[in-house]
Image (spheres, grey):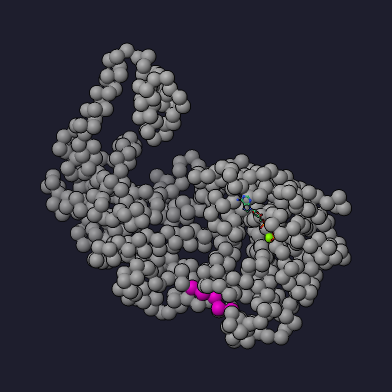
Amino acid sequence: MNFSSKLIENAVTEISRLPGIGKKTALRLTLHLLKQKAPVTSALTEALIKLRNEIRYCAICHNVADKEVCSICESTKRDKSLICVVEDLPDVLALENTNQYSGLYHVLGGVISPIQGIGPDEINIASLMQRILHPPSGTPVEEVILALPATMEGDTTSFFITRKLKDHGVGVSTIARGIPVGSELEYTDEITLGRSILSRIKYSAE
Amino acid sequence: MHLKNLELIQFKNYPKVQVEFSEEVNCFFGENGAGKTNLLDAIHYLCLTRSALLPLDSYHVMHGKEFFTIKGDFESHQQPLSVNCVFESSKKKRISLNGKPYQRLSEHIGLLPLVLIAPDDTLMINGGSEERRKFFDGMISQTDSHYLQLLIRYQHYLKQRNALLKRFAEEKRTDKAQLLPYDTQLVSLSQAIFEKRAAFLTEFFPYFADHYRAISGEKESVSISHESQVRKDNFSQSFAQSLERDVLLKRTHFGIHKDDYLFRLDKHPLKKFGSQGQKKSFLISLKLAQFFIFKMIKGTKPLLLLDDIFDKLDDRRIFHLMDRVARKEFGQLFITDARPERSKEILRNIQADTRYFTIKNNRILADESN
Ligand SMILES: Nc1ncnc2c1ncn2[C@@H]1O[C@H](COP(=O)(O)OP(=O)(O)OP(=O)(O)O)[C@@H](O)[C@H]1O
Ligand SMILES: [Mg+2]
Ligand SMILES: [Zn+2]
């Protein structure tokens, strides 16, 4: 693309670095921002700068936080005997949006994959062990829920963590994997279907 | 099952071609280098998602172009199946069935069974164990989709474990806890894959022996034995014990990636003691057994591609094949030959809907005599 202004070109280049945004969309967004009143764009840039400078990661669970400890870890309403282990930040948001979970989280920041040079030391496993052995809230951890991706790397990481927890008297569970609500059996892939039949649950007609 | 037509765009030497096939016998003539094998390879792509010749998709894009497309309409059990395969440089290959793209290409394998008999098949006898594993794995995958998934997982875990071994070697330390997830998976997958391989061979062997007997005239006895470390009773222990060596050499030494199939003639290894003719008979029998076991399991006749075989086989073996063509034991056939007179002579007495094509200047022309 050829821009008559170097300033526009810079803005387009930067915006198009975002995932899912190509040069065309970036140009549309740039022109849109130009049309707005000055406070609108400065609010955006300020939010971004503040985000960058002030964002912190929770010292306990590695979730995003405004302070040393995140609002979830701090809340008195959460069940502190439960820790749900996830790969990354979006997973916390997704689970929070279900409104079905009231325990704590632990964000690993990745899964084990030697091909990519990621071992247990490169992700937040040591701090998980630490908070289980010495709970910061004083409430002992009773159950660790593994909510890692249903990939070979996710499984490897779950296996590794389960082994590490083996002799510490904590229950370990993993989220159920199965057929999406509203889908037909015959269109479900074999692996998912296979897993669902193996980990079937008791049916209650109460 | 049969392929009704094929369209190629920028696939190897073909800028753009369209062909309509006969449901029975299709013969392609053309000088050396005309593109006969390339045409068969395109059919191989449609059925098995990849080339039979070179694994890298980018090699199949016409020189100087950015993408290739292969399209074909099949009919199987009276159902129309349109397959579209597109590869664009630096992008993932996409395959769709009746307009619906596959999430996992491996899901397509097995839907359209295919058997290819080609000149470089001799590698299967004279080459290393991976050639024989490739043949048997390909066959089992086409008949059992679960097997393919096991194999994909096995290979992935093996890669991860080897990467970890390399890291341990570099860091001069070994952490067994990190190896354990892979060891556990590899041992249990090895066992599962081993069992499927062994069961398949039991089913496969009688087909093979029948064809060999028919081709060779019952002169020698043949055997195929599946050699595997898994056969040892203490497999998981041996796996664990080889850790030191694994770390030292940064590779996993135990598991089904070391399996081999030993071909024997009257108890002697075919590779060392077989004559040229015996090896050819062995190969053709392996391929025919593949055809007939697919037919039995799938309930449909696979496509049969015969690349340049009249050049490589003697009359006796050609007769054995053509006798089966004449008796309509095969389904749709694709035959290539650089010498039209030879093929026409061989096919002359066979009652079948036969279509001849000539490949020249990167175009495929149906003969007027059709
Ligand atoms: N990516 C590519 N782009 C253009 N041409 C290609 C490409 N790959 C291979 N070719 C050409 O395809 C031709 C080889 O075709 P093929 O192997 O199908 O020949 P053939 O008719 O089977 O010959 P033979 O009778 O010797 O077996 C060569 O001329 C080669 O240059
Ligand atoms: Mg050829
Ligand atoms: Zn927290």
x then y, percent, for residue B322 = 79, 68
Question: Residue visible at 29% across and 58% down?
Answer: A160
Question: Residue visible at 17% across and 42% down?
Answer: A59
Quarter where residue B326 is shown: bottom right
Between B293 and B321, the one nearer to me in the picture: B321
Depicted B231 relative to depicted B366: above or below: below
Between B147 and B35, the one nearer to me in the picture: B35
Say whether residue B81 is visible. Answer: no
Quarter where residue B204 is shown: bottom right
Q: Is residue B261 magenta?
A: yes
Q: Is residue A169 magenta?
A: no
Quarter where residue A41 is shown: top left
Horizontal relation, residue A5 to residue B276: left or right: left
x then y, percent, for residue B169 = 29, 66
x then y, percent, for residue B263 = 59, 79
The main secondary structure of the magenta stretch is: strand
x then y, percent, for residue B98 = 63, 43
Question: Residue visible at 26% across and 45% down?
Answer: A107
Between A176 and B248, the one nearer to me in the picture: B248
Horizontal relation, residue A204 to residue B103: left or right: left
The N terminus of chain B lies in which quarter of the figure?
Answer: bottom right
Depicted A65 relative to depicted B261: above or below: above
Depicted A78 relative to depicted A85: above or below: above
Between A150 and A115, the one nearer to me in the picture: A115
- Residue range in magenta is B259-263
Question: Residue visible at 16% across and 52% down?
Answer: A130
Say whether residue B162 is visible. Answer: yes
